[in-house]
């Protein structure tokens, strides 16, 4: 992936994904209270990596569910 210097400051923080999203949404709120460019957040590779790291650290997320697909099979 990219070097640490290329990562936004919110990636390296200790905040969980919920707190990170809240902070990012606050930055993208206009004066009428609507948010804009949400796909820029959701499709950001660093955001997706942060989500993956949070999910994979929880017990049971690497076990099979209704399908045979597991989180550790994602590249």
Image: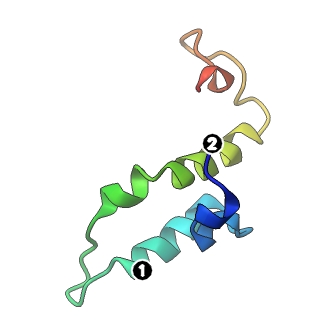
Count of number-bearing discs: 2
Q: Give the residue displayed 69% in from the left and 45% down from the top.
A: 53
Q: Give the residue displayed 77% in from the left and 42% down from the top.
A: 57
Q: Give the residue displayed 25% in from the left and 84% down from the top.
A: 30
**Mark 2 neighbour class, 10 Å CA radius: few under 14, some 14 to 19, many 20 or more:** some
Which numbered disc covers residue 26? 1
Judged from the image, the secondary structure of the residue bearing numbered disc 2 is helix
Q: Give the residue displayed 50% in from the left and 48% down from the top.
A: 45
Residue 32 screen position, x and y as percent: 20, 87
Between residue 25 and residue 67, name the one nearer to us.
25
Residue 40 screen position, x and y as percent: 35, 59
In the image: residue 35, left or right of residue 12: left
Which residue in the structure is indicated by mark 2? 52
The disc, 2 or 1, on the residue closer to the chain's N-terminal end is: 1
Judged from the image, the secondary structure of the residue bearing numbered disc 1 is helix
Looking at the rendered image, the quarter that the N terminus falls into is: top right
Between the residue at mark 2 and the residue at mark 1, the CA separation in whole angstroms equals 22 Å
**Mark 1 neighbour class, 10 Å CA radius: few under 14, some 14 to 19, many 20 or more:** few
């Amino acid at each position: 992936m990219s070097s640490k210097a290329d990562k936004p400051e919110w990636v390296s923080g200790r905040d969980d994904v919920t707190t990170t999203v809240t902070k990012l949404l606050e930055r993208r709120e206009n004066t009428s209270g609507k948010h804009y460019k949400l796909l820029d957040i959701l499709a950001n590779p660093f955001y997706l990596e942060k989500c993956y790291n949070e999910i994979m650290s929880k017990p049971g997320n690497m076990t099979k569910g209704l399908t045979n697909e597991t989180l550790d099979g994602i590249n």
